Amino acid sequence: MFGTNGVRGIINKDLTVELVLKLSRAIGAVLGPGKIAIARDSRMGGEMFTHVLMSGLISTGCSVVNLGPAPTPTLQYMTPRLGCSAGVMVTASHNPPQFNGIKVIGSNGIEVTREIENLIEISYHSNQSKTAEWNKIGEVTHYSTAIDVYLEGIKSHLDIDKIKEKQLKVVVDSANSVGGLVTPRLLRELGCKVVSLNSQLDGSFPGRNPEPIPENLKDLSAAVTAMDADLGIAHDGDADRATFVDDAGRVLWGDQSFALIASRVLAKKRGSTLVTPISSGRLIEDVARKSGAKIDWTEVGSVVVSHRIEEIGAELGGEENGGVFYPDHQPVRDGAMTASQIVEMITLEDKTLSQLVSELPIYFNTKVKVPVPLEKRESLLGALLDLSKDMNRITIDGVKIIRDDGWILIRPSGTEPLYRCFAEGKTQETADHLSEEGVELIERAKKLV
């Protein structure tokens, strides 16, 4: 039921009112009684599922604090500060418009562990809903200032006066979702001149698909160059990630923005630890080495990274998809926090974003998706492990094949019926060639299962 980041499915087909009601009662049974905070992004069905969640949770004796439309990191920031035993976010993050989903947040603001998810699934499948006595059902309250508190939390980590002096011009593409409620406002309060794209909430995502990848950010790139802006910022559907466009209109890949932040954060403390999934590339290794930091590798998935940061007290975490975890603020991905850190960096170093990127080592990458039915996901991985047994590889998550001129990572998606093939090389031609090798390996494995 739970993938790498929550329960997701097509609205009214896979993710139904009946499923969400039953799931909400399971969440209440495992994580209640107590207060549970909830929020949603702009997706279709969000309001419908929010009402269902509230009904199911209060029927188990939990009380609900409804934050309304808000980014996932806002809910994560507020859950512990409101003294809640859990949080529930209605979102499918970067998935296409027909999807929605449910993320379950622990009392510390981090997505719950796999063990807790398993307990929720057991309760869900037991068909023995636990409901409260008539005089012990919960109640619903509405908390309308969550975004205010969250933005003040972000600003507490920034040199606001310096940023205001710079008066950067920034174009923000909020993907017609809840990022539009936070990042444009935050940057204006930091003295930036902000131009908003796709800022109206619309679950059909008319402006672009919600995944902030280069092919979806052509309008943002064009706007940055046409307006002579200092940078562009794009969020995914629930605004826990940020992708950047530099002053020349070029889309940065996630490792680049992550590396820029890492190089500054890790330099503050010799011997720092950086937590990152196996999908991160050699650029991150270069930055960590230069800063005297060590890397703690994990499986792919923001939940894994967050819990590892907490477990070992790491100074920073990050992913190649634009997710950055800054534990001084909160140990989860936070798109608005990431955006403000890049804006502050441009200000304090008095360099353009393109100049900052030009100082980084250069690598090239390619990402490809290969459709694979869910029922063949595990058997295909077994075939891949067999086919690659004589190669130089890492098998923390999927198969990462190491070559002198780059690497290939092949792993199943935790949210969609497909396999992802990541490749990195010292040239784009090398990355493309390695990617083709990876796809060919997947196709060979498909014939064996």
Image: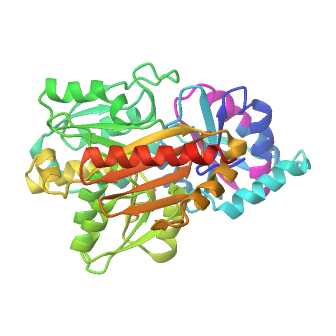
- Residue at the (52%, 55%) spot, across then down: 301
Percent coordinates x, y for residue 428 in the rendering? 26, 45
Asked whether 291 falls inside the magenta stretch, the response is no
Residue 313, image x and y in percent? 44, 75
Residue 33 lies, in percent from the top left, at 76, 57
| In the depicted structure, whether residue 388 falls above or below residue 237 | below
Q: Is residue 42 magenta?
A: yes
Residue projecting furthest to the bottom: 271
Stretch of the chain drawn in magenta:
26-52
Q: Residue at the spot x=43%, y=48% of the render? A: 437
Q: Quadrant of residue 159?
A: bottom left
Left or right position of 113 against 200? right
Image height of 445 relative to 194, above or below: below
The residue under the point 19% across, 58% down is: 361
Residue most extreme to the left: 350
User: 342 and 280: which one is in front?
Assistant: 280
Q: Is residue 274 left or right of residue 73?
A: left
Which one is nearer the viewer's eye here, 356 or 144?
Answer: 356
Can the viewer see residue 148?
Answer: no
Q: Nearer the viewer, residue 246 or 25?
A: 246
* Rendered location of residue 436, percent (x, y): 42, 43
Q: Is residue 19 left or right of residue 71?
A: right
Q: Is residue 248 above or below residue 404?
A: above
Question: In which quadrant of the rendered view does residue 89 lie?
Answer: top right
Q: Quadrant of residue 212?
A: top left
